[in-house]
Amino acid sequence: MPSVTVRAPAKVNLVLSVGPRRQDGFHELATVFHAISLYDEVVAEPDEQVSVTVEGVHSELVPTGDDNLAVRAAEILAAYAGVTTGARMHIRKGIPVAGGLAGGSADAAAALVACDELWGTGLGRAELSILAARVGSDVSFALMGGTALATGRGERLTPAMVGGTFHWVLAMADEGLGTPEVYAELDRIRGRRTVAAPAVAPDVLAALRSGEPEALGELLGNDLQPAAFALAPGLEATLEAGRALGALGAVVSGSGPTCAFLVHDSEHALDVAIGLAAAEVAADVARTIGPVPGARVVT
Ligand code: C5P
């Protein structure tokens, strides 16, 4: 069997409502995931063992042992399907590491699709999605792609209708944030206050259906933002710089530190990207569109 290459997208959270911390340490969420055109690629070849190598910006920060999410995904699939062989995987990172864009989850979703193809296990998307949720909260979505309302810890997905393509500018920071640290900071800020059940306003789903960025922009929001600001104080200035450049909405993506700016169209995206780069508020700037499909074989 020749190698299999799978591409999986990054995500931004259009809205992230964080409820109370659960007994298992996770937080109950209501969020809207939106897959964007920034990708990691996983190339898998048959081998005796499961292993991984990684290339790309800050790839040295990605673990290559059993704690690598692609390795975990491949091992969970092998155990589930009774596969006794392995896979040598190579990850090409296009998604910033520790950026709040679910790059590790994209790798896990890509690994599931790649190994399913490589090993001929032939599981359907529904079965792969159940395995995905065992690897991490965002992995099922990286498999599904598009735009989806998510509840639970982020693994219970309902596809959302979207009436068009949205244009985004991303501002990347040079140092990542750890997701567990950001959630812990939120708990610290909230202290003993009672936390309401998480919810996504119906207006958000209506704005998505309309396909109008002007309607969606003002509804973007993220409960993790105060915690991300506390750990990475420069982020408020980055969001402000994007707003000053006319972005329709500005939000920290997931646990950060990447900031996502919704813009009118591709021309506006170029203006905002150039403006952010000139303002020197970001280590790197990227233009993307969404929604895009989830993890797919590309060879
Ligand atoms: O599921 P995943 O491995 O992506 O989660 C990483 C960490 O993020 C968890 O260990 C937890 O600290 C935090 N988290 C959370 N509630 C969620 C999702 C993630 O507290 N719903």
Image: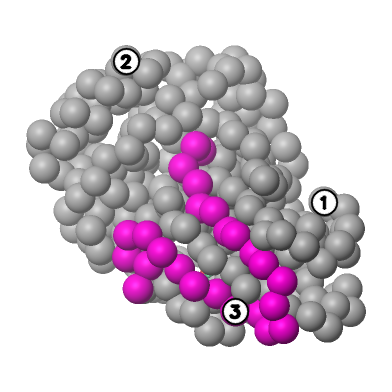
Quick check: is the Cβ at mark 3 less than 8 Å away from ligand 1? no
What is the three-letter code of the residue carrying label 2? Answer: Glu
Q: In the rendered view, tell whether residue 89 sits above or below residue 30.
A: below
> In this image, 105 relative to 81: left or right?
left
Residue in the picture at 42% in, 72% down: 62
Q: Which SS class for mark 1?
A: helix
Residue 30 percent location from the top left of the image: 61, 49
- Judging by the rendered image, the residue that carries numbered circle 2 is 267
The residue segment tinted magenta is 36-60
**Contact flag, marks 1 and 2 (Cβ < 8 Å):** no
Residue in the picture at 68% in, 56% down: 4
Q: Which SS class for mark 2?
A: helix
**Few, some or many C-alpha atoms within 10 Å of disc 2 (few <14, some 14-19, many ≥20)?**
few
Q: Is residue 42 magenta?
A: yes
- Type of secondary structure dominating the magenta stretch: strand
Q: Quadrant of residue 269?
A: top left
In depth, the one of 226 and 177 nearer the eye is 177
What is the three-letter code of the residue carrying label 1? Answer: Arg
Residue 48 percent location from the top left of the image: 72, 83
Q: Earlier in the sequence, mark 3 or mark 1?
A: 3
Q: In the rendered view, tell whether residue 219 sits above or below residue 141.
A: above
> In this image, 138 relative to 112: left or right?
left
Q: Quadrant of the N terminus?
A: bottom right
What's the CA distance linking mark 1 and mark 2? 36 Å
Judge whether residue 227 can be spotted in this image. no
Q: In the rendered view, tell whether residue 270 sits above or below residue 95.
A: above
Residue 137 percent location from the top left of the image: 62, 63
Residue 5 percent location from the top left of the image: 63, 53
**Contact flag, marks 2 and 3 (Cβ < 8 Å):** no
- Residue 125 tag number: 1
Q: Earlier in the sequence, mark 2 or mark 3?
A: 3
Residue in the picture at 59% in, 49% down: 8
